[in-house]
Image: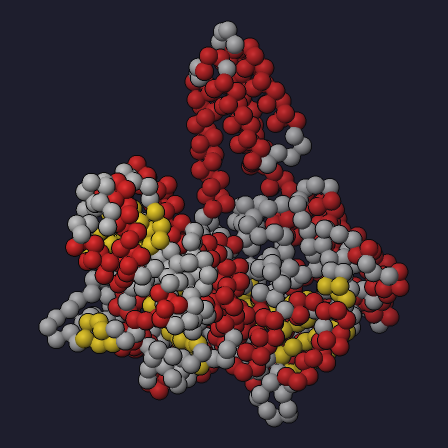
């Protein structure tokens, strides 16, 4: 794989000369042809879905003129002209993505993993190292959910402020040169009805960051007009309250400009960029009267919901048409010259599309040829077999004929054909398989493995920087190791980390001055400053998004979500952006964010949550750590800081005042991920649990021992990954009985643990009794100590569950109590 060294220089000259204007028009015409041909490719069946940037060409050309090396984009699926203008996207690459070409050289944005018009640049090298960002244009990997690019945009912009204002980061010139870089956001008008958009704008103003947001306003959100989307139907009117006063840095700059007025657009973007770079203030450019000539996407037609008058207006005020009229009016070009440019670009785009299609099809066609050859060999082999061979041969020949006649077979069709032939051979010919059938079966096994890699790699880091391959340093203790409150152990850990890593920052509600509600950061804001240990507003979505953007630009953030229950506010960004970032960029982007939160037992419905199944099933791609105490949490933080993957650490809410011995090597010791720890050895029943349940399970195990049941208590330590070394199965070989215990709802994380132990690790083979789970009640915990007791597992319920397993397997040894 070839890694790019730097993007080409800006293709757009800053001056509006006749030559540059004609070059701009040519690029706009090229992009329009891409949209027109792309739609036809979908409607003729060559691609599954298409969404394009037609109507927004000249506004994006103006934006590209103000874009500088080191800047970074956080946009959405209408930005093809911007990407082309910056030299970050060729026509062939656009069509390769349209066809879902999985070759990263041909489709560098996502290697066929994201649908069309989801753009990205390479920001991470093959070995996990960040590539330089200041010598090139950068684009963070797009996501489809509307508005989801906004929280990340805040962090991408905030990184420039940190690089400008933190002296210890002045030498990180690969990420920033004096904090002059702008984070450019783009969004559609209808998406601005999303709450996360307003949360992001507010956060950007509070943080005072160099963010320039373009709102492409075509008056609709698919079929729903602005009057139903936005109060007053006017985003500029709503944004007025954020506008900063002259001479103030509080608030944002707001521009409103027509999407068909190219000179005004260029003037606006240069003014916006200048103030954002100089003053580090956010800017919003509301680009109105944008058109969408082909409607929202290939999923429908805008003629169904737009009036004839509106459609006629869109033809008249198409930005490309207005630009053409202006060039003719100003005698820069004749209509004949512009028509010639249109035709040249139509032909060039068509040729590029054909090259992309042929390059996409070539390896699949080569693979089809191989399969057809093997199918022919299998048919011949079966035909020579008696007595049922002729019938099987005919069936295999039919499978080959159908595969050969497919106009554009996919890899799935090749695999399905090979599988169908395997079934036919196994069902007939006396169930005898010859060498040809064996070769076909072997080919399919290899083909399945190759495609699993093609479409399944890079969920988490596969580099030498992965936290799963970092050296494990055990905690060391001595006679002088002090016994502290749990929160004091965490404070010592964070203090050492902030001293060691100048790029480390932490942010969250009440985190700074107070040191967090449980005082894990007590005194650290005073020691390291408000930029590195920062208070935030109550805005979980942008706390998380802020961290993602910072991490993509070389900052190491710890984002605190005050309670696990409140992570639900940020779960969409966790799931759709952070968890998928490495995967959807095929390993070319990373955001090693650490999310710190706390949960499990406390008091009441919204402070005692353990929604672990919801978390672990929605954030695959993020390591989920569930330490039983603060020392274990500290070791996990240390390990995650050495790695390049995101992680969530869920501290035990009622553990901050419990006493723990402080390791002498608090700054260095690490706890491995995916490696359970046996807390109490036993021979009769294996109890698998984590977090706050560990202490209660140990208490129950002591009581069980009094009645002759020796429970082995295992702390899994992390739910993602889960028991990478299959240590729990080794316990089952001894006890032959299993209880999975946690505080999630019935069928929650306990069911996930069962699936891992019984199915993935083969633990079922070692059981002499039915495995069981013990979870919380289906409702959330009621308030008060009694509410907690009858809502979640307790010492007595654990005792009863374990004893019931033992009694069922050997009632004479363990009679009913």
Q: Is residue 296 left or right of residue 322?
A: left
Q: Quadrant of the rendered structure where residue 470 is?
A: bottom left
Count how many numbered circles sit on residues in the image: 0
Residue 157 rendering spot, x and y as whole percentages: 53, 74
Q: Is residue 603 left or right of residue 13?
A: left
Q: Residue furthest top?
A: 387
Q: Quadrant of the rendered structure where residue 85 is?
A: bottom right
Q: Residue visible at 68% across and 83% down?
A: 240
Residue 196 rendering spot, x and y as whole percentages: 58, 70
341 or 816, nearer to the observer: 816
Q: Is residue 173 left or right of residue 802?
A: right
Q: Residue visible at 52% across and 75% down?
A: 539
Q: Is residue 467 visible?
A: no
Q: Residue visible at 41% across and 84% down?
A: 530
Q: Residue furthest left?
A: 479
Residue 654 rendering spot, x and y as whole percentages: 32, 71
Q: Residue furthest bottom?
A: 247
Q: Is residue 684 left or right of residue 65?
A: left
Residue 208 rendering spot, x and y as whole percentages: 54, 82
């Amino acid at each position: 794989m070839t890694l790019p060294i730097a993007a080409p220089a800006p293709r757009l000259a800053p001056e509006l000369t006749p030559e540059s204007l004609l070059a701009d028009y040519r690029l706009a015409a090229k992009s329009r042809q891409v949209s027109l041909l792309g739609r036809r490719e979908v409607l003729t069946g060559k691609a599954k879905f298409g969404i394009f940037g037609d109507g927004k060409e000249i506004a994006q050309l103006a934006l590209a003129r103000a874009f500088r090396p080191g800047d970074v984009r956080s946009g959405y699926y209408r930005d093809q002209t911007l990407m082309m203008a910056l030299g970050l996207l060729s026509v062939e690459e656009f069509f390769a993505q349209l066809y879902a070409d999985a070759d990263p050289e041909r489709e560098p944005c996502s290697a066929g993993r994201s649908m069309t018009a989801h753009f990205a640049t390479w920001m991470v090298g093959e070995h996990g190292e960040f590539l330089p960002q200041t010598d090139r244009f950068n684009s963070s990997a797009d996501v489809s959910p509307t508005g989801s690019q906004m929280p990340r945009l805040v962090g991408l912009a905030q990184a420039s402020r940190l690089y400008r204002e933190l002296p210890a980061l002045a030498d990180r010139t690969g990420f920033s040169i004096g904090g002059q870089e702008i984070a450019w956001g783009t969004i559609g008008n209808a998406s601005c009805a999303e709450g996360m958009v307003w949360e992001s704008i507010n956060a950007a103003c509070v943080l005072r960051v160099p963010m320039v947001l373009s709102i492409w306003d075509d008056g609709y959100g698919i079929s729903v007009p602005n009057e139903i989307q936005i109060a007053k139907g006017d985003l500029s009117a709503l944004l007025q309250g954020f506008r900063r006063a002259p001479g103030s840095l509080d608030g944002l700059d707001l521009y409103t400009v027509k999407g068909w007025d190219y000179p005004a657009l260029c003037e606006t973007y240069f003014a916006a960029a200048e103030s954002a770079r100089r003053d580090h203030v956010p800017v919003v450019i509301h680009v109105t009267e944008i058109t969408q000539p082909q409607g929202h996407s290939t999923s429908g037609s805008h003629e169904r919901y737009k009036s004839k008058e509106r459609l006629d207006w869109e033809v008249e005020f198409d930005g490309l048409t207005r630009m053409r009229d202006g060039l003719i009016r100003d005698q820069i070009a004749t209509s004949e010259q512009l028509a010639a440019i249109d035709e040249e670009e139509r032909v060039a785009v068509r040729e590029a599309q054909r090259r992309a299609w042929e390059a996409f099809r070539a390896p699949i066609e080569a693979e089809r040829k191989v399969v057809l050859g093997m199918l022919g060999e299998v048919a011949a082999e079966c035909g020579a077999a008696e007595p049922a061979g002729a019938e099987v041969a005919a069936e295999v020949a039919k499978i080959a004929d159908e595969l050969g006649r497919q106009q554009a077979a996919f890899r799935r069709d090749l695999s399905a054909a090979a599988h169908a032939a395997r079934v036919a051979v196994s069902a007939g010919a006396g169930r005898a398989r010859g060498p040809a059938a064996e070769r076909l079966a072997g080919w399919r096994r290899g083909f399945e493995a190759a495609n699993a890699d093609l479409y399944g790699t890079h969920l988490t880091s596969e580099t030498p920087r992965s936290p799963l391959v970092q050296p494990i340093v055990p905690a060391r203790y001595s006679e002088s190791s002090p016994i502290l409150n749990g929160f004091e152990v965490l404070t010592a850990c964070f203090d050492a980390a902030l001293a060691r890593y100048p790029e480390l920052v932490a942010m969250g509600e009440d985190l700074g001055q107070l040191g967090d509600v449980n005082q894990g950061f007590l005194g650290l804001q005073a020691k390291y400053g408000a930029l590195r240990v920062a208070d935030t507003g109550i805005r979980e979505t942008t706390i998380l998004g802020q961290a993602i953007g910072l991490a993509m630009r070389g900052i190491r953030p710890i984002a605190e979500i005050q309670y696990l229950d409140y992570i639900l506010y940020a779960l969409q960004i966790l799931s759709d952006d952070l968890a998928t970032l490495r995967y959807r960029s095929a390993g070319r982007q990373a955001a090693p964010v650490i999310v710190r939160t706390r949960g499990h037992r406390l008091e009441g419905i919204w402070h005692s949550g353990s929604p672990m199944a919801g978390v672990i099933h929605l954030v695959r791609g993020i390591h989920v750590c569930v330490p039983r105490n603060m020392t274990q949490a500290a070791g996990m933080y240390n390990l995650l800081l050495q790695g390049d993957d995101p992680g969530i650490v869920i501290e035990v809410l009622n553990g901050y005042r419990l006493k723990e011995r402080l390791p002498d090597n608090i700054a260095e010791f690490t706890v491995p991920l995916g490696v359970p720890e046996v807390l109490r050895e036993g021979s009769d029943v294996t109890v698998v649990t984590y977090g706050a349940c560990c202490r209660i399970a140990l208490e129950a195990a002591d009581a069980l021992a009094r009645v002759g049941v020796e429970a082995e208590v295992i702390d899994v330590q992390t739910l993602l990954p889960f028991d990478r070394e299959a240590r729990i199965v080794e316990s089952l070989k001894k006890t032959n009985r299993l209880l999975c215990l946690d505080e999630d709802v019935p069928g929650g994380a306990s069911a996930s643990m069962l699936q891992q132990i019984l199915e993935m690790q083969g633990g079922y083979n070692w059981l002499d009794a039915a495995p069981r789970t013990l979870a919380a009640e289906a409702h959330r915990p009621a308030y008060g100590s009694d509410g907690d007791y009858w809502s979640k597992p307790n010492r007595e319920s654990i005792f009863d569950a374990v004893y019931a397993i033992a009694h069922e397997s050997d009632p004479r040894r363990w009679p009913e109590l």
